[in-house]
Image: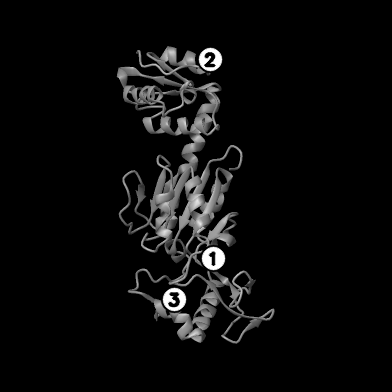
Amino acid sequence: MTQNKLKLVVSTGAGISAESGISTFRDADGLWENHDVMEVASHDGFVRNPALVHQFYNDRRAALATVEPNAAHKILKDLEDYFDVYVITQNVDDLHERAGSSNITHLHGELTKVRALDDESKVFKIGYQERTDPDTVIEGHKVRPHIVFFQEAVPMFEKATELAAEADIFVIVGTSLVVYPAAGLLHYVRRGVPVYYIDPKPSPVPAGVTVIREPATTGMAELEIVPDMHTRKKRMAELAHGCIALPGGVGTFEELMEIITWRQLGLYHGNIVILNLNNYYAPLLSMFEQGIQEGFMPADHYRLFKVASSVEEAVDYALASDTDVKVSNKF
């Protein structure tokens, strides 16, 4: 992980490219540009009619040259100012690359490339306009589209699962979550990691996933994880040595939990002062104490807390430099 940045892993599907004008087949009864998907995007289809498959992807490459990355692609690039961003995409276009994203894993191959039929490690970039057919030879090799067809293994899936398991924040954009194994990435995300799902027609997802029922461009703009985090970091910086959690005000329960996560990741080193008016935070504190007593929560992680019974006391704690303090629920 890049120093001082959380790892944001984003899984993108056809919906993000559709807003740039790239056709998809998920809403078209299995047809893709008037072709049966299994005729142009399956291993059996390629064996039966390689000429048709070559022609199909020649046309897709030419069409790709006429479209541009949209706002959702550009927001993902901009997020690199705040996060260590990794994009896992099911899309075979290069719009993430053209938007400037740095770390991209293509699960289903890349449209602007072909690979050798006799050696899949030999991959050739051919751009948008070059057309291939079953007799095309590059560097002594006959070639095929560099696409993972249905009925073929997904060689980059293991890398994708590792990224999902390392995520501090996981975002799903523009996918129906019905194409496997890509749809299974959600199940590799660690418990407690914030997960967001952006799609105008979202599939059912586990409890705890934040669903934004919007197209990719609108949904990414509504995500607002950067301004929100920036505001909280600024607030912590202003406090210098601590953050005051005020019930229902500065520091909601959700904000407090996020700041605790930052502290555990080593991104924030100050006190966390809990203003426990009317026992608002009692359940949280009891959970910590029980976890420490039962041995599944390291006590060192929770020595950053002070629990205050008044605003004045909370301010005094927040401005103090001592961070070796223990959790208490005595107020």
Residue 235 lies, with reference to residue 20, above or below; the image says above
Between circles 3 and 2, the one closer to the viewer is 3
Nearer the observer: mark 1 or 3; the answer is 3
Question: Outermost residue, front direction?
Answer: 295
Q: In which quadrant of the rendered image does the N terminus lie?
A: top right
Labelled pair 1, 2 in contact (Cβ < 8 Å): no
Q: Is residue 132 left or right of residue 20?
A: right
Labels 3 & 2 near each other (Cβ < 8 A):
no
Q: Amino acid at mark 3?
A: Ser
Residue 2, compared with residue 62, is above or below; it is above
The residue beneath circle 2 is 320
Q: Which residue is mark 1?
A: 68
Q: Nearer the viewer, mark 1 or mark 2?
A: 2
Helix, strand or loop at mark 1: loop
Residue at the image point whose x is 48% and y is 81% from the top? 46
Q: Amino acid at mark 1?
A: Glu
**Reading the chain from its start, which is encountered first: label 1 or label 2?**
1
- Please, what is the three-letter code of the amino acid marked with disc 2? Ala
Q: To which quarter of the image does residue 83 belong?
A: top right
Image quadrant containing the C terminus: top left
Q: Name the residue that disc number 3 marks.
A: 42
- Crowdedness near tag 1: few (<14), some (14–19) or many (≥20) residues, C-alpha within 10 Å: some
Q: Position of residue 192 (x, y in %)?
A: 40, 39
126 to the left or right of 271:
right
- Please name the residue shown 34% across and 43% down the image: 208
Q: CA distance from mark 1 to mark 3?
A: 27 Å
